[in-house]
Image: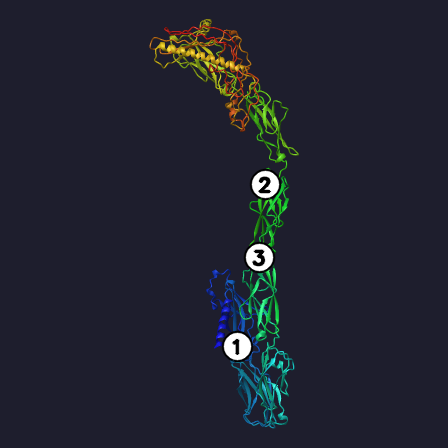
Amino acid sequence: MDLLSGTYIFAVLLACVVFQSGAQEKNYTIREEMPENVLIGDLLKDLNLSLIPDKSLTTPMQFKLVYKTGDVPLIRIEEGTGEIFTTGARIDREKLCAGIIVDTHCFYEVEVAVLPDEIFRLVKIRFLIEDINDNAPLFPATVINISIPENSAINSRYALPAAIDPDTGINGVQNYQLIKGQNIFGLDIIETPEGEKMPQLIVQKELDREEKDTYVMKVKVEDGGFPQRSSTAILQVSVADTNDNHPVFKEDEIEVSIPENAPVGSSVTQLHATDADIGENARIHFYFSSLVSSVAKRLFHLNSTTGLITVKEPLDREESPNHKLLVLASDGGLMPARAMVLVNVTDVNDNVPLIDIRYIINPINGTVVLSENAPLNTKIALITVTDKDADHNGRVTCFTDHEVPFRLRPVFSNQFLLETAAYLDYESTREYAIKLLASDAGKPPLNQSSMLLIKLKDENDNAPVFTQPFISLSVPENNSPGTQLTKISATDADTGRNAEIHYLLGIDAPSEFNLDHRTGILTAVKKLDREKQEKYSFTVLAKDNGMPSLITNATVLVTILDQNDNSPVFTHNEYNFYVPENLPRHGTVGLITVTDPDYGENSAVTLSILDANDDFTIDPQSGVIQPNISFDREKQESYTFNVKAEDGGRVSHSSTAKVTINVVDVNDNKPVFVVPPSNYSFELVSPSANPGTVVFTVVAIDNDTGMNAELRYSILGGNTKGLFMIDQTTGNITLKEKCVLADLGLHKLIVKAKDLGQPDSLFSVINVNLFVNESMTNATLIYELVRKNIEIPVTQNVETTHTSSPSSDYVKIMVAIVAGTITVILVIFITAVVRCRQSPHLKAAQKNKQNSEWVTPNPENRQMMMMKKKKKHTPKNLLLNFVTIEEAKADDADNDRNTVTLDLPVELEEQTMVKYNWGTTPTTFKPDSPDLAQHYKSASPQPAFQIQPETPLNLKHHIIQELPLDNTFVGCDSISKCSSSSSDPYSISECSYPVTNIKTPVSVHTRLTDSRTSTIEIYSEI
C-alpha cells in the first residue's frame, strides 16, 4: 500500500511539474513507408490551442519543430497552423527499431515548441510506427543442406533453418511449404516459447542410402501480410549412416551477467552437452543457431568443441544490454540439442553524459543569432542530456559554468529549455559562448561540456548623439558661395546600418546653408549679408539607417561678422527745410538723418558740409543744421548746399545729399493801397446808377506771401447814409440804394484793408471820396471840397438798443468816450515806454513745440517772434489827430440813431507822399506766386523734437508801415496794439513815434438840423 501511495504522489508531482513547465505529450500512430505530405495531425486542435485568442498575443502563434542539428526529420509542421505532415524522408520501421527482438512497438519522438512566449509550451510527440509488410521472409541461405540417417523411422523430424522476416506480427513468418517432397518427406511447423515458428522435415517413408543418397527439394516461407510476401530456398537432403542418440544439454536455459567492461577473451559461460553414442557418433559439435543476431555473433565466441562462450569483442551495454544466444549441439545427426543462453551486460559508468542541443531558433553556421530586444524568457534551444549508463550512472544534471543572462529550465526528464533570464544589450556584450556542463551521478562522476554560441543582433535602439548639442560659429559676410563653415559630427552606439548616420537640415533651416548628408560638412551656398540678417539659428538632424530610423537634433547658431560693405544712406536724396525768416542765428534749421547698415566702427557716420559753406554748420554726429546768418526772405528765399556722410571703416565709404533751406514768410508787411492813390483822389458816381453797380474798386497789396498776403476789405467809417457797400474780397464798392436828390455831393468812405496773417493781422486804412453828380464841370472845386472834407470828422453810425431819453443817452456816451480815450492813451504810452526800453538782443525764452519731423520752428506755436525792421524812413512831420466824437439827436421819431464821428489823422505835409513802385515790389496778385506758408505746413517732413532758440536778434522789427498821410491811413487792428507778433518767441517789436504837438480843432458837420455837438480835443506826443 505504501508503495502504491508513493507512486501516486510521484505521478501527481510529475504532472504538476510538466504542467507548470509548459510541457505536454501527444501520441500519434503512423504507418511506415508513408508518402510525402500526408497529414498526420493538427496540434492547434489536438492541444486545444484554438481557444487562445490571437488578439492577446504580441505575435501570431507559431509551432517550431525542435530536432537535433544534422538530423533529417521524418515529419514537418506548418508553423502557422500546427498541422503535421510527412516529409520526403523514408519512414522505415525496421531501420528505426533495429535490434529490437522482444518488443513489438517502435516509436519515433520529436519535440515541438509552441510560441510566442506568452503561451509557450514544449510538446513531446511520440509517433508509433506501424509495421507494414514491406519485407519478404528470407532463409539464412539459398541452399539448405541437411543429413538424415538412412535408418530414420517414419515420422522422424529434423529441424530446418528458420527464415527471418524483419516485419513483425502478422507481417512476419507465418507458414512454410515443402515443394516437390516426392511423398518421402513432409514439413511441419512448431512454435517455440519465444513465438518463433520453426520448420521441421518429417520422414514419411523408409530411406535406403544405397538406393538413393540425395534428395533435392524446395522450401517456401510465407508471411501473413498484405500483399503476402514469400521466398524459397533449395533443400538438399543427404542420407547418412545410422546415428541412434541425440546430444542433450545439461541446462536448456542459462542466464548469465557480465560487466560491459569485461575484457576480450573473458569467459561468459560454459555449456555442457552429452551423447549416449560412442565414437564419432558421440562427438558433439557446438554452434550458434541461425536465429542468433549478427551482433551477438560478432560480440561472442562459441568454442565448437568445448562449448565455452567467451567475449569476442568489447561489450557495450548501451548498445546491447542483453543478448540471446541460441546454441545448438549436434553429434552429426539430424536432431541437434538446443540451449538458450541469455547474456545480460551489466552497466559500468563508462559513458560520459551526452548533450543534445536542439535549436528552437535556427542557428546560422552553428551560431544562434538573437535580437538584443528579445523579451525575457525567449526560448533558444531544447537541451537534452542523456547517459547510456544505467541507474545512478545514467542520472545526469546540466548547468552553465558562469553567470550569463540565460538559464536552463527543466521541462521533461533530462530535458531543459535554454531561455533568456535578463534583458540583453548588444552595446555592452555582443556575443555569448555558453558552456553547458552535464555530469552523471556515477562514482567517480563523468562530465561532458558543450559550447553554445549566441550572437546578439544589433537593433536600432540607440539614437545618434551629436558631439556638440549646440554649435555656435561666426562667419564673415560677403563669403564665396560654397564656403565650408564647419563639420558636424554625431556617433551612434549601434553597428552596421543602424550606425550609419545621415545628416539633414531641419525644416527651419534657411536656404543659405547646405549640409552634406554623408560627411556632415556645413556650407554656405549663398553670399551672406549681415545687413539682411545678422544671425541664423536652425536645427540639424542626425538620422541613422535603422528600421525604424532614430533621429536626434542639434541647434546651430551662425553669427555673421560685419564688413564695411555699405555706404551711409540718407533718409532722403534731397532735403527741403522751411524756416521762418525771423529764425535766430545759430537756431536749429533741421535734422539730417543718416543710417549705415554696417556695425560698430563701420556704421559710425560723420557729417560735414561741402563746398566751404560758412552760412551753415552741421553737427557731425547728430546731424542738426544751424545757421550762422539771419534770414531775410525778401533778400534770399532759399539756400542750397551738399552734405557728406562718411563712415568709420578702415576703407571708408561716403555719400552725399542735397540740402535746400527755404525761408518762409513772416507777416511783417502791412497792406499798401494802390487804388486810390491818395486820400485826396475822388471818383465820379452817376446818380442814375442802379443799385449793385460797381462805382469804384479799392486795390491794396501786401509784400508778404501766403495767408499773410491775403486781404479783406471793409468800410470802417463814413458812408453815413449807408449808400455804399464794399466786397471784402475784391474791394468793389457798389451802390446799395438808388441815389436821391439829397445824395448828390461828396461822400467820404474810410476803407480798411486787413491781411489774414497769423497770429496777428496787419491793416491799413484810406479815404475813398465819391462825388455823386451827373458830371464834373470844375475839378478844382471838387479837389478843394475833398480837401476841406478831410478836415471834417467821419461819422460812424451806431444803432442803439435803448429807449432812454436823448439827454440821458448823450451823457452816457460822453462819459464812455472820455473813459475809453483816456484808457487808450495810457495803454499806448505805457506800451511805447516798455517796448522802447527792451534790449534789442533779447533772447527767446521758451521752447517751440514741433508737430512734424523736420527741425523747423512752427509759426503756430511760437511765443515770441522778432519782427523785421522796416527799411523805409519815418516821415519827419506826422500829425495824428485823434477822435472827435459828436453825438447828434433828432427831435422827430424817425431819427432814432446816435451818430458818432471820429477825427482821423491828417497829414499836413503833402509833399512827403511816396508813390508805390509796381516794378520793384512783389505783389500778391500774381497767379503763380507760391504759397510758402501752405507748403511749410503740409509738405515739410518733420522730426519729433523741439528747437530751442539760441541767439537773440540784433535788428528791430516794426509792425507799423509808415506812409505819407496823403497816401494812406496808418493804424493797428486795435488801437492798443502796436505789434502783430506779441506771441512770437523769436521777435521783439518796437513802436517808435515822432513827437509832434499839434492841436487841430474839429468841427462836426451833420445833415441833421437839430443836433448837439460835443468836441473832444486830444493832444498826443508821437
Q: Position of residue 70 (x, y in %)?
A: 59, 69
* Disc 1 to disc 2: CB gap under 8 Å: no
Q: Tell me which numbered mark, 1 or 2, is placed earlier along the sequence.
A: 1
Q: Secondary structure at mark 3?
A: loop
Amino acid found under the numbered disc labelled 3: Glu
Q: Position of residue 899 (x, y in %)?
A: 39, 10
Categorize mark 2 by other alpha carbons within 10 Å: few (<14), some (14-19), many (20+): some
Q: Is residue 820 left or right of residue 125?
A: left
Q: CA distance from mark 3 to mark 1?
A: 50 Å
Q: Position of residue 352 (x, y in %)?
A: 61, 72
Q: Is residue 310 left or right of residue 767?
A: right
Residue 88 quadrant: bottom right
Report the residue that reaches farthest toward the front.
2
Report the residue that reaches farthest toward the right.
650
> Which residue, given by chain and number where applicable, does mark 1 sit on?
105
Which disc number belongs to residue 459?
3
* Disc 3 to disc 1: CB gap under 8 Å: no
Which disc number belongs to residue 535?
2
Amino acid found under the numbered disc labelled 2: Lys
Q: Which one is in front, 78 or 943?
A: 943
Categorize mark 1 by other alpha carbons within 10 Å: few (<14), some (14-19), many (20+): few
Q: Tell me which numbered mark, 3 or 1, is placed earlier along the sequence.
A: 1
